[in-house]
């Protein structure tokens, strides 16, 4: 029934939201969907003098078509090039003058703009985010000015061998979904961006129904909600919800690629497996497994590979996306040790798959994860990011609100099941970056 209603709405282009709807109102967290579809999220805190202000959109490279590759990232740049109310550079200057910081980020599944500033200046900062995300200039002149800047960023990425490794990995790992394309896009698409394409993309994606305004810190909820209603709440736009991201077919083969580059002197190896979307309950045992294998100097992989001289460094874990995710292992070592390192990694994984992960490792990892999360949420920026990500990408605020509880509930059986379901030693993706003599 819900799918049918959504289909009818998409055909008619209608907006059924006629009244504001309070979604969460408990303790220090308040969430309201405004009449125009925008969502405002306020977390009041009296343990800090700082405020994090963020505006999130379900806008990212995974939603782009072939002509738009890189446009989500390009728009991120464009929104810093002046607005209907401010000149280029004016907003950054005003924020920095008050001791704050401003930036933005674009990924596969999201784009967000953020300011961190002292509490007395929260309203002015939020006003600037309102200007940027609802009334950017997007002029032909500024588009042409920005193209060489983004193309130079692309050149730097293509000159970075390790970046090429990950671009190659994603192209191997993904066959159906747009995670195979780099967020920055391609030269041939960026060069063709014009005023019509940029404006069409902005006004169809940067709309209230796809907008999440997050304010976290020393503020009063009523003041924030009132200001948001006066500003973001008056923005108009056709309803938009990002399309479903297709899941990859289960991987049943080993996909390998070797890259040789004269700039590197060691072996860089990435190995990974398909993993569930970030909205899945299985993400929590995935996080615990990540902590067991890679969580600091006491982790299994660090002790068994780094401490024993098989690698110079080793990282990895669960990379959660809205669609098919990845559980990856990445290590750097001497060329003559790369195969021995892989053998050791697979030996450890096989033992855990066959016999299960020791209970004490699971419990210790959970404790570290919970303590680390509590500590990191002391910072308003991280706290706001967790909320914004849960709302705009996972589409479930409980992912943030119940994260600690969910980690505490993970059992040894959950971790063992995740290993056996997803970590197949005869079906994975591997890319090696090696020196070219």
Image (cartoon, rainbow, N blue to C red):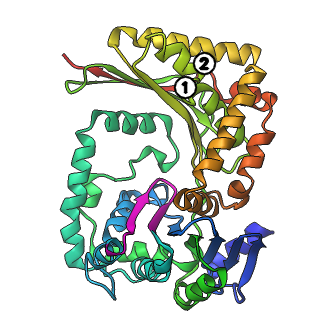
Residue drawn at x 33%, y 34% is 162
Residue drawn at x 32%, y 66% is 77
The part of the image, by quadrant, that contains residue 398 is bottom right
The answer to whether residue 431 is left or right of residue 194 is right
Of residues 177 and 34, the one drawn nearer to the viewer in this rendering:
34
Seen in the picture, residue 197 relative to 330 is either above or below; the reply is below
Q: What residue is pinned by disc 1? A: 428
State the quadrant of the N terminus: bottom right
Seen in the picture, residue 26 relative to 309 is either above or below; the reply is below
Is 314 included in the stretch rendered in magenta? no
Q: Are marks 1 and 2 in contact (CB under 8 Å)?
A: yes
Q: What residue is pinned by disc 2? A: 425
The answer to whether residue 284 is left or right of residue 316 is right
Is 101 included in the stretch rendered in magenta? yes
Residue drawn at x 71%, y 18% is 353
- The secondary structure making up most of the magenta span is strand
Q: Where in the figure is residue 234, as x and y percent of width and height? A: 54, 90
For mark 2, does the 10 Å Cα neighbourhood hold few (<14), some (14 to 19), or many (20 or more) residues? Answer: some
Which numbered marker is on residue 88?
none
The part of the image, by quadrant, that contains residue 211 is bottom right
The secondary structure type at the circle numbered 1 is: loop
The part of the image, by quadrant, that contains residue 355 is top right
Q: Where in the figure is residue 389, as x and y percent of width and height? A: 58, 59
Seen in the picture, residue 212 relative to 280 is either above or below; the reply is below
The secondary structure type at the circle numbered 2 is: loop
The answer to whether residue 326 is visible is yes
**Residues in magenta?**
97-116
State the quadrant of the C terminus: top left
Q: Where in the figure is residue 26, as x and y percent of width and height? A: 78, 71
The answer to whether residue 22 is left or right of residue 130 is right
Q: CA distance from mark 1 to mark 2?
A: 7 Å
């Amino acid at each position: 029934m819900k799918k049918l209603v959504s289909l009818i709405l998409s055909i008619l282009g209608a907006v059924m939201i006629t009244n504001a709807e309070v979604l969460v109102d408990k303790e220090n967290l308040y969430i309201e969907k405004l009449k125009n579809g925008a969502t405002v999220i306020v977390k009041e805190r009296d343990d800090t003098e700082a405020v994090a202000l963020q505006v999130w959109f379900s806008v990212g490279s995974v939603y782009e078509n072939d002509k738009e590759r890189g446009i989500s990232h390009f728009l991120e740049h464009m929104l810093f090039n002046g607005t209907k109310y401010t000149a280029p550079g004016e907003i950054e200057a005003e924020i920095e003058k008050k001791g704050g910081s401003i930036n933005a980020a674009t990924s596969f599944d999201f784009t967000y703009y953020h300011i961190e500033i002292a509490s007395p200046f929260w309203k002015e900062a939020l006003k600037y985010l309102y200007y940027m995300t609802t009334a950017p200039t997007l002029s032909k002149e500024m588009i042409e000015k920005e193209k060489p800047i983004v193309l130079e960023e692309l050149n730097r990425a293509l000159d970075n061998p390790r970046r090429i490794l990950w671009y190659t990995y994603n192209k191997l790992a993904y066959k159906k979904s747009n995670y195979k394309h780099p967020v920055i896009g391609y030269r041939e698409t960026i060069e063709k961006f014009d005023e019509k394409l940029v404006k069409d993309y902005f006004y169809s994606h940067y709309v209230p129904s796809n907008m999440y305004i997050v304010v976290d810190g020393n503020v009063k909820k009523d003041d924030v909600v009132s200001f948001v209603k006066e500003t973001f709440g008056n923005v108009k736009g056709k309803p938009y919800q990002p399309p479903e991201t297709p899941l990859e077919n289960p991987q049943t083969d080993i996909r390998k690629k070797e890259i040789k580059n004269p700039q590197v002197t060691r072996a860089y190896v990435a190995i990974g497996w398909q993993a569930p979307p970030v909205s899945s309950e299985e993400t929590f045992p995935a996080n615990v497994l990540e902590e067991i294998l890679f969580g600091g100097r006491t982790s299994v992989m660090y002790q068994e590979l780094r401490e024993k001289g098989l690698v110079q460094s080793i990282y990895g874990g669960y990379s959660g996306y809205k669609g098919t995710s990845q559980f990856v292992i990445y290590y750097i070592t001497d060329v003559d040790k790369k195969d021995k390192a892989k053998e050791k990694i697979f030996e450890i994984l096989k033992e855990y798959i066959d016999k299960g992960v020791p209970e004490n490792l699971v419990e210790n990892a959970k404790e570290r994860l919970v303590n680390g999360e509590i500590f990191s949420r002391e910072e308003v920026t991280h706290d706001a990011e967790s909320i914004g990500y849960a709302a705009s990408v996972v589409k479930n605020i409980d992912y943030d609100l119940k994260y600690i509880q969910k980690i505490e509930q993970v059992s040894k059986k959950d971790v063992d099941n995740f290993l056996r379901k997803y970590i197949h030693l005869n079906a994975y993706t591997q890319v090696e970056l090696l020196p070219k003599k």
